[in-house]
Image (spheres, rainbow, N blue to C red):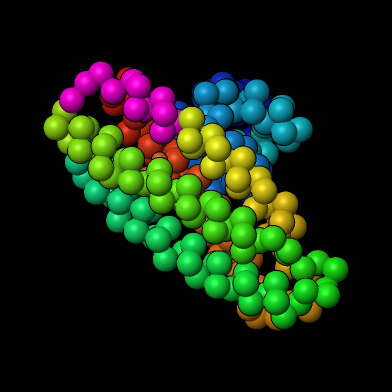
Amino acid sequence: MTTTTLAPLARLTVRDIAVGRPGSTAVFRRFKIDYCCGGGATLETAAAKRGVAVDAIVEAIEALAPGTTKPPADTNALIDHLLERYHDVHRWQFPEAIRLATRVEAVHRDHPACPTGLSQHLAHMFDELEAHHQKEEMGLFPMMRRGQSPLSGPIACMTHEHEDVVEQLHGLARLTNDFTPPDGACNTWRALYALCAEIDADLRDHMHLENNDLFRRFG
Ligand SMILES: [Fe+2]
Ligand SMILES: [Fe+2]
């Protein structure tokens, strides 16, 4: 593939690519390109910031199988999707991850790679996320369903809280060695890091759909 054919996609914003090609978010995660809160940059700029060749990212996006399901166009259906696919899912993911982390931290406390503090970090994330969910479920989403506008105040508040979540996800990646268990790790340790990686992916996709799709409908 030549640079000439790659150029148009590279000049789009990460946000627009993520919305237009839903499967691209997995590619962005693989290359550590921020698509949920920092999605306003062009792909070219975002790649340069990460020190990654933009052509490699474009090729990976172009290679995606067609047919990845797009999020609902109808606003009520999109809100329902966010609640069922993300809010409800986070509500079982976090307690399970906290349970596994508590066990790993206790059993492997003398191991040099023991993720000390992980259960506490997950519990703090879950507390803050639950408060955030409540604000969306009890305040912002019902206003959106009623078609109220402008909603720039509450949207700015939610967007700001999403940025805090991204910081917490950086902490999660640090504590888990980028979700990589040490050689010879037990099944619980592996399951814990796999779940933490899933939490990272789901939270980024969740915030991306809110920031770059739902919230922009009320901008
Ligand atoms: Fe949400
Ligand atoms: Fe949110």
Q: Is the magenta stretch mostly helix, strand or loop?
A: helix
Q: Is residue 86 above or below residue 183?
A: above
Q: Is residue 166 above or below residue 99?
A: above
Q: Give the range drawn in magenta.
A: 148-159
* Frontmost residue, 22 versus 141: 141
Quadrant containing the C terminus is top left
Q: Is residue 116 left or right of residue 197?
A: right
Tell me which residue sits at (71%, 28%) in the image: 49
Instruction: State the image coordinates of residue 29 (x, y, percent, origin top left).
Output: 59, 46
Is residue 135 at least partly visible in the picture?
A: yes
Q: Is residue 150 magenta?
A: yes
The answer to whether 49 appears left or right of 76 in the picture is right
> Where is ligand 2, by quadrant?
top left
Q: Where is residue 209 in the image (x, y as percent from the top left)?
A: 39, 39
Instruction: Point out residue 84 in the picture as x, y percentages from the top left corner.
Output: 30, 56
Point out the image quarter for the N terminus.
top right
Q: In which quarter of the image is residue 175?
A: bottom right
Residue found at x 55% / y 53%: 124
Question: Quarter of the image holding residue 48?
Answer: top right
Residue at the spot x=34%, y=27% of the render?
A: 154
In the depicted structure, whether residue 209 falls above or below residue 98: above
Q: Does the magenta stretch include residue 118?
A: no
How far across and how far down the image is residue 108, in percent? 76, 77
Res. 63 visible in picture: no
Residue in the picture at 48% in, 30% down: 160
Which of 92 and 40 lies nearest the eye of the viewer? 92
